Amino acid sequence: MPYLLPKDRDRLDPLINQLAEAISEENRAGDINYIINQLLLGNIGQGKYKDYNELVGTLEAAKLEFYRRKVAPYEEKKAKENGDLEGFASN
């Protein structure tokens, strides 16, 4: 995760907050997918393999960071509440 300097956060956060508020609950996945793709298309650089590779790597890192911070703790909580996996189901 790129832990940005406060000055960089101050520059970006108002725009991100405005965009987040514009996302509809009814079409959240579609809206977010569109936004991500438009951001990527607007940042292709020279359109060389290096540029595409950097953007795909950024997506992967963002996915992993979101999973680590939000999804994994949720899954741990649910495993404690409902019981963890215990191997193959018996017949």
Image (cartoon, rainbow, N blue to C red):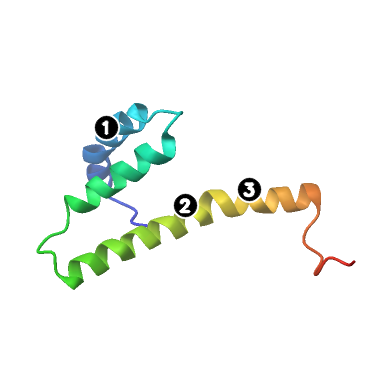
Q: Position of residue 31 (x, y in %)?
A: 35, 37
Quadrant of the frame with the N terminus: bottom left
Q: Which mark is residue 41?
A: none
User: For this view, does 84 lie left or right of residue 17?
Assistant: right
Tag 2 secondary structure? helix
Residue type (three-letter) at the residue carrying disc 1: Pro
Quadrant of the frame with the C terminus: bottom right
**Which residue is tagged 2?**
66
How much space separates mark 2 and mark 1, taking CA atoms?
A: 20 Å
**Which residue is tagged 3?**
74
Q: Residue at x 27, y 42 (%)?
A: 9
User: For this view, does 73 lie left or right of residue 26?
Assistant: right
How much space separates mark 2 and mark 3, taking CA atoms?
A: 12 Å
Tag 1 secondary structure? helix
Residue type (three-letter) at the residue carrying disc 3: Tyr
Residue extending furthest toward the bottom: 49
Residues at circles 2 and 1 in contact by the CB criterion of under 8 Å? no
The quarter of the displayed image where residue 86 is located: bottom right
Q: Position of residue 29 (x, y in %)?
A: 43, 40
Residue type (three-letter) at the residue carrying disc 2: Phe
Q: Residue at x 32, y 32 (%)?
A: 17
Q: Which one is earlier in the sequence, the residue at label 2 or at label 3? A: 2
The quarter of the displayed image where residue 55 is located: bottom left
Q: Position of residue 5 (x, y in %)?
A: 27, 49
Residue 91 to residue 16: above or below = below
**Which residue is tagged 1?**
14
